[in-house]
């Protein structure tokens, strides 16, 4: 028998010497898992939407995150001036004035009498040779004060000084730009009035000029998200979606609504990242948008508010809402095809019966307003709450297409065992759908992850989750993990794939796995294996006599593996995870008419200690290592402790 052997190990490990399936393992060597891949058997599709992402306004994932605005509290609303700005003066004064401006209610008043009145803000990241631009709004109240915008380094060295000329006494937007000659991660902006008189300031903006022109998305975080290649992106939430005022997130940036993020800490949000910005993000990444509608009740005005958004997104430019969209820069309909009817309604006090009524009302309207759209209803939030999902299916199954459940594991030590619980309830739910009056309903898992840690346990959990979701296809058609992004200064309890400060980012434990598995997605399910058992002297028996051989000392939760194949049959992909602290071996046999005689094989592995994690200082602490392998139809792979592996076989 031909053979192939490799050790799935860390960056410094070399390939193991060839190990034939008939070799006798030494005493005390770990267990084996067996995966038989037969391409002649019936295959089922795996939807690419299993590899989606979920972007919620939480923990500064968007504001002071993906959205590239550098100024915090730009409109001085709420407690923003106190939180983000400093004031200082000499023969002058600075105060907050209760003045209506655009959608805001507060402005800053600078009064000078021969001295200066100034405000400033720090923690700006400015890079060498990059042009930055922005604007601020000014209204002269009396006298003839002069206004200057200064940028200084964290050490007080001047980087830019820009006189801001204005005329008249109406509100006017004054643009500015500058290009720093040095890099500084803690630079300051200062706006200072001098001379004699009084003026008002409002809505100050600053970002990279190229970024402002190209969607206002922070380049490094955009790249990090793009490297995950999401098939779809769910937005704006999450719980945030339940109160999202979409009409205040369109139009001119300075005229949008201010809404502190009451769900997630009350931090400032001026809705700079709204409908156009989100759909621009989806276009850049070639990802399908899934819009979560706020559906707080069945009153006519509540339903119409949600439907207005659908009209704005999808109507031709000849309609009222289409014309408004065109005036905001996008004449062509966006053609959004996925809408979700709110999020976790049980959090808002709804029973499954009450929520089913909401689904029937909103779902029936969506059927006529967006007849080509797929409608997502909220399934259970907890794995033991089958009653919620079953009632929503029975009472509202005519008015939605996908039941979106949530799967969180909150105890990090259950990074593997929690998957058994999740598998159990998803299998029960799939079977209930099949037996119901709505057997064509699909299941989605629209929030999932191992929470309360971002170490390598989250990566192992992600590997098991994604293999589970592939295995449950085609009844399960879409998933997206949560959280996607969060600032390193926010509540550490809610963990994510991408961690950032205002300068850089590092991957959480799940990121490398999500990226690796997405890169090696294949559209057809072939086979899977779970658990490992005692090795035998002649490993050929485990294949040749698989129908009668009795495996012994089987241990579940040790090794999992899945084999998939591309739609054109040119690629076979095997994904595997070893959850255990000892090495285990995966034995693979490829058989069937579509198995290539000649092929190239490559293995990618990620190995780390359970508690290992990346950081801003060491962003590549958990990363894949790749090796070319000699192709064979029978082979074994030694999986080092706590290892995720992907083997891709390409027909020559």
Image: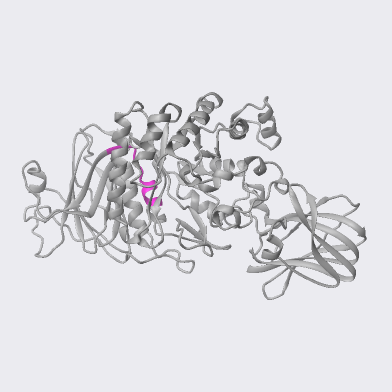
Name the residue furthest bottom: 155
Nearer to the camera, 135 or 177: 135
Q: Is residue 281 above or below residue 183?
A: above
Residue 141: x and y in percent read 89, 56
Q: Residue furthest right?
A: 143
Task: Return the residue nearer the eye: 336 or 96.
Answer: 96
Q: Position of residue 123 (x, y in %)?
A: 64, 67
> Closest to the observer: 425 or 251?
425
Q: Which residues are magenta?
A: 514-525
Q: Where is residue 336 drawn, in percent x and y? A: 54, 33
Q: Would you say 245 lies left or right of 398 here?
A: right
Instruction: Please report the residue visible at 23 percent of the width from the left and 54 percent of the height from the top.
Output: 557
Residue closer to the observer: 189 or 196: 196
Q: Residue at x 74, y 50 (%)?
A: 104
Residue depicted at x 54% and y 27%: 365
State yes or no: residue 522 in magenta. yes
- Which colour assignment does the render follow? one colour
Is there any visible trace of residue 47 in the rendered image?
A: no
Q: Horizontally, is 59 left or right of 422 in the view?
A: right
x and y, in percent, of residue 651 in the image: 28, 40
Is 337 positioned to the left or the right of 422 in the image? right
Determine the image quadrant of residue 77: bottom right
The quarter of the picture where the C terminus appears is top left
Residue 619 seen by the camera: yes
* Above-or-below relation of 369 to 240: above
Residue 460 forms part of the magenta stretch: no
The quadrant in which residue 278 appears is: top right
């Amino acid at each position: 028998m031909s053979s192939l052997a490799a050790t799935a190990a860390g960056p410094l490990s070399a390939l193991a010497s060839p190990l034939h399936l008939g070799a006798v393992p030494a005493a005390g060597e770990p267990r084996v898992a067996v995966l038989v891949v037969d391409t002649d058997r019936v295959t089922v599709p795996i939807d690419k939407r299993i590899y989606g992402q979920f972007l919620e306004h939480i923990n500064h994932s968007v504001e002071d995150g993906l959205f590239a605005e550098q100024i915090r509290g730009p409109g001085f609303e709420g407690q923003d001036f106190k939180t983000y700005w400093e004031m200082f003066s000499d023969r002058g004064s600075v105060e907050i004035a209760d003045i209506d401006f655009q959608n805001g209610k507060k402005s800053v008043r600078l009064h000078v009498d021969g001295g200066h009145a100034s405000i400033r803000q720090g923690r700006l990241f400015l890079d060498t040779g990059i042009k930055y631009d922005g604007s601020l709004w000014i209204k002269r109240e009396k006298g003839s004060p002069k206004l200057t915008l200064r940028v200084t380094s964290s050490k007080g060295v001047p980087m830019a000084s820009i006189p801001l000329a204005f005329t008249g006494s109406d509100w006017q937007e004054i643009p500015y730009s500058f290009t720093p000659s040095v890099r500084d991660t803690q630079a300051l902006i200062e706006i200072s009035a001098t001379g004699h008189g009084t003026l008002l300031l409002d809505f100050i903006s600053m970002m990279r000029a190229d970024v402002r022109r190209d969607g206002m998305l922070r380049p490094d975080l955009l790249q990090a998200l793009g490297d995950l290649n999401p098939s779809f992106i769910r937005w704006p939430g999450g719980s945030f979606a339940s109160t999202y005022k979409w009409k205040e997130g369109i139009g001119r940036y300075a005229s949008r609504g201010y809404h502190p993020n009451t769900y997630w800490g009350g931090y400032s949000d001026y809705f700079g990242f709204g409908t156009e910005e989100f759909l621009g993000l989806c276009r850049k990444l070639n990802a399908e948008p899934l819009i979560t509608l706020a559906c707080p009740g069945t009153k006519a005005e509540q339903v119409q508010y949600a439907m207005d958004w659908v009209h704005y997104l999808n109507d031709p430019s000849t309609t009222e809402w289409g014309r408004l969209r065109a005036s905001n820069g996008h004449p062509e309909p966006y053609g959004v095809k996925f809408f979700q009817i709110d999020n976790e309604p049980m959090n808002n006090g709804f029973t499954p019966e009450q929520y089913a009524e909401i689904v029937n009302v909103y779902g029936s309207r969506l059927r006529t307003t967006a007849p080509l759209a797929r409608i997502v209803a909220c399934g259970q939030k907890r794995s033991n709450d089958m009653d919620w999902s079953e009632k929503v299916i029975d009472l509202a199954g005519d008015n939605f297409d996908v039941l979106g459940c949530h799967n969180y594991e909150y105890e990090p030590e259950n990074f593997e065992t929690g998957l058994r619980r999740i598998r159990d309830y998803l299998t029960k739910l799939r079977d209930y759908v099949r037996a119901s009056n709505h057997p064509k309903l699909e299941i989605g898992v629209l929030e999932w992850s191992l929470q309360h840690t971002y170490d390598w346990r989250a990566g192992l959990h992600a590997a098991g989750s994604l293999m589970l979701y592939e295995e449950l296809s085609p009844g399960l058609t879409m998933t997206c993990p949560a959280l996607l992004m969060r600032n390193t200064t926010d509540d550490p309890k809610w963990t994510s794939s991408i961690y950032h400060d205002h300068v850089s980012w590092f991957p959480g434990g799940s990121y490398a796995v999500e990226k690796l598995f997405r890169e090696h997605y294949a559209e057809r399910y072939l086979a899977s294996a779970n658990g490992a058992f005692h090795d035998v002297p002649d490993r050929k028996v485990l294949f040749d006599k698989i129908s009668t051989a009795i495996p012994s000392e089987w241990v579940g939760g040790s090794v999992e593996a899945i084999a998939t194949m591309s739609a054109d049959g040119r690629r076979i992909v095997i994904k595997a995870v070893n959850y255990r602290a000892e090495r285990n071996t995966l034995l693979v046999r490829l058989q069937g008419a579509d198995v290539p005689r000649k092929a190239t094989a490559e293995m990618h592995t990620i190995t780390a200690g359970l508690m290992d994690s990346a950081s801003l200082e060491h962003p590549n602490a958990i990363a894949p290592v790749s090796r070319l392998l000699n192709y064979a139809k029978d082979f074994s792979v030694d999986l080092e402790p706590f290892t995720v592996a992907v083997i891709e076989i390409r027909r020559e």
